[in-house]
Image (spheres, helix red, strand yellow):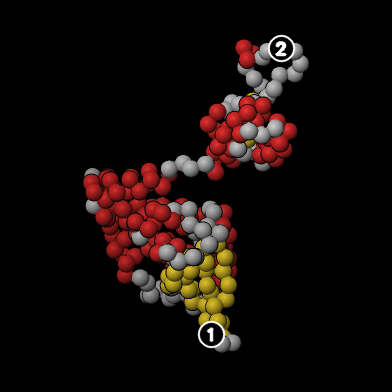
Amino acid sequence: MRATVAEFGPVTAARIAELLGLTVAAVRRHLDPMVAEGVLETREPRADARRGRGRPAKDYVVGSAGHDALPAGYDDLALSALAYLAEVQGPQAVEDFANRRFAALEHSLAGLEGTVPERAQALVEALAAQGYSASSRPAARGTAVEGLQLCQGHCPVQRVAESFPQLCEAERRTFERILGTRVQRLATLAHGDHVCTSFVPLEALTQNQHDPQDDTVATATGDQTEGRRS
């Protein structure tokens, strides 16, 4: 019914009933909950469309929640944009983009203190707010808890990450900097698994322990910044 309103709207309940071969009463039983949820919205008909006596029938249009649920093609646009970026600027440009994408998450959790589990909980809440359906649970071997299992049951950029794994790697390195410990990727939605899962040990890294790849990323990003300034 939402698709019918999207195609023919603004449209009355009577017209929807005619298009779908239903009674007006049956159509209204579907329309009312969708209006309450914001999937559809009602609006007064145009003055030139009002005919006859009595209260004019309201028109239905797709609401903001309904537009969010309809296919948008954002994945195709993102894939095309990154493919073009890689072709014109090279693979490093895609890595720079991936690092920049997670900069906001890292900035929002900058200065995070506490134990690794406490930091992980703050990270889970931040990811959940961004639609990742994140959670964490103890990872034990026998009776000993060795770390945490960080899970993401949904990935808003899954289709893009399937073609550009740089997004997953940039995310992993961001998790390491936020949590202050190693993060080992065990499974990803982008690789066909049913969930993104990472193992997070409880021990924090010391100052002289770091991922050599971070140096490479920092250097590349710094070089790019200098290039823009010159």
Residue in front for this viewpoint, 227 or 175: 175
Could you say whether the residue bearing mark 2 is in a helix, strand or loop? loop
- Mark 1 is surrounded, within 10 Å at the Cα level, by few (under 14), some (14 to 19) or many (20 or more) other residues, namely few
Could you say whether the residue bearing mark 1 is in a helix, strand or loop? strand
Which residue corresponds to mark 2? Answer: 52
Residue at 35%, 48% (x, y): give it.
Answer: 79
Confirm whether residue 28 shows in the render. Answer: no
- In this view, the residue farthest toward the front is 21
Which image quadrant: the C terminus? top left
Q: Amino acid at mark 1?
A: Arg
Residue at 66%, 22% (x, y): give it.
Answer: 44
- In this view, the residue farthest toward the bottom is 142
In screen coordinates, is 13 left or right of 221? right
Confirm whether residue 79 shows in the render. Answer: yes
Q: Is residue 156 above or below residue 63?
A: below
- Mark 2 is surrounded, within 10 Å at the Cα level, by few (under 14), some (14 to 19) or many (20 or more) other residues, namely few
Residue 141: which disc? 1
Count how many numbered circles sit on residues in the image: 2
Tell me residue 114's x, y (percent).
56, 69
